[in-house]
Image: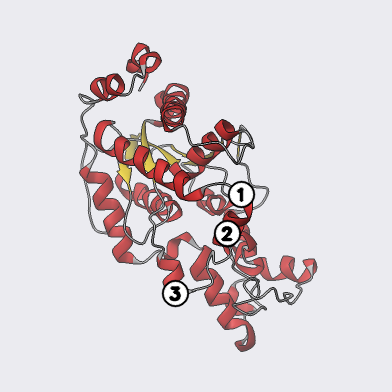
Amino acid sequence: MTLDLSGGVNQMIIVDYNQISISNLMAELNGSKDSDINIDLVRHMILNTLRSYKTRWGDEYGDLVIACDNRRYWRRTVFPQYKASRKKTREDSGYDWTSIFEGLSLVRNELQQHMPYPVVDVDGAEADDVIGTLVEWSQKNDLVQEGLFESPRPLLIISGDHDFQQLQKYENVVQYSPLRKRFVKIKESADAVLREHIIRGDKGDGVPNILSDDDSFVEGKRQRPIRKALVAEWKSQKPEEWVTGEMAAGYIRNKTMVDLSQTPEEIKEQIVFQYTAQLDKSAEDMYKYFMNFGLDRLIEVIDEF
């Protein structure tokens, strides 16, 4: 990523759009699987949630950035089993996920058109890629002068996803989980957290541990167990000290899937391009947008956006 800007770069509150939107939507459905999606209520809830983040943390961390999951994932191209079980899990849930995702897509497009926040939705990228890339990019491009030196401005990630704990290796990064209503603190180094994540894999994303077959979750196979003592030993060492030929394929697979520095360079460049291209978005359309959808309560607090 060679793009460099002087001035005009804002501090960031990066919001994991799908996570906060789905949590709002589930609250609205309240467990009722037969209810139609009330898109007007969902729109209001998402906007009001964004307003609450801006009013609570805007002075300290700056402007909102909306990080989106694209419909296509580069990880699935590399590892076809990635999140392969999600579709069945959704089908079994009883919710109308087609309508849910259509509603979230509609509101996302409205945010892109009418709100003053950068909305980053890059072909092949997940919100993980957007957040990881912007955090990495901020280390050299979103700086503040402190005496004789420049350092990255404080940056807030709003998501409960444990994938982002690895980004706390950067001193300017703070993570807040809206579901747990608390900041995410790690008990060991971010590098150790990442190494354990690579070793154990990620069941939620269909990534087995490094000793197990690619299709372990898809085919319902039992994973090869890894003793806690061995995990502790491995994560305290450099990979070249313990990764053998037998486990190298699993290690490389998992590092590619969970290490956010592994996002392909061309996707990183598109993320930075989309973000920087939207830094000067106007707030002029916001009032008309709120009026068109009868968002009277939000009009009363429009200055808080």
Q: CA distance from mark 2 to mark 1?
A: 39 Å
The residue under label 3 is which amino acid type? Val
Q: Residue at x 43, y 29 (%)?
A: 50
Q: Describe the element under mark 1 as helix, strand or loop.
A: loop
Give the image quarter of residue 117: top left
The residue under label 2 is which amino acid type? Asp
Q: Describe the element under mark 3 as helix, strand or loop.
A: helix
Q: Describe the element under mark 2 as helix, strand or loop.
A: helix
**Which residue matches tag 1?**
94
Q: CA distance from mark 1 to mark 3?
A: 30 Å
Position of 268 relative to 45 (above/below): below
Left or right, 208 with reference to 55: right
Please state the horizontal and vertical placement of residue 216, each as a whole percent of the image: 65, 75
Q: Is residue 90 visible?
A: yes
Picture disc at residue 246:
none
Mark 2: give few (<14), some (14-19) or many (20+) Cα within 10 Å: some
31 or 228: nearer the viewer: 31
User: Considering the image in quadrants, where does the N terminus appear?
Assistant: bottom left
Look at discs 2 and 1 and give the one toward the viewer: 1
Please state the horizontal and vertical placement of residue 249, each as a whole percent of the image: 56, 82
Q: CA distance from mark 3 to mark 2?
A: 24 Å
65 or 122: nearer the viewer: 122
User: Considering the image in quadrants, where does the C terminus appear?
Assistant: top left
Q: Residue at x 58, y 40 (%)?
A: 34
Look at discs 3 and 2 and give the one toward the viewer: 3
1 or 30: nearer the viewer: 30
The residue under label 1 is which amino acid type? Gly
Marked residue nearer the N-terminal end (3 or 2): 3
Please state the horizontal and vertical placement of residue 302, each as a whole percent of the image: 33, 17
**Which residue matches tag 3?**
78
Picture disc at residue 191:
2
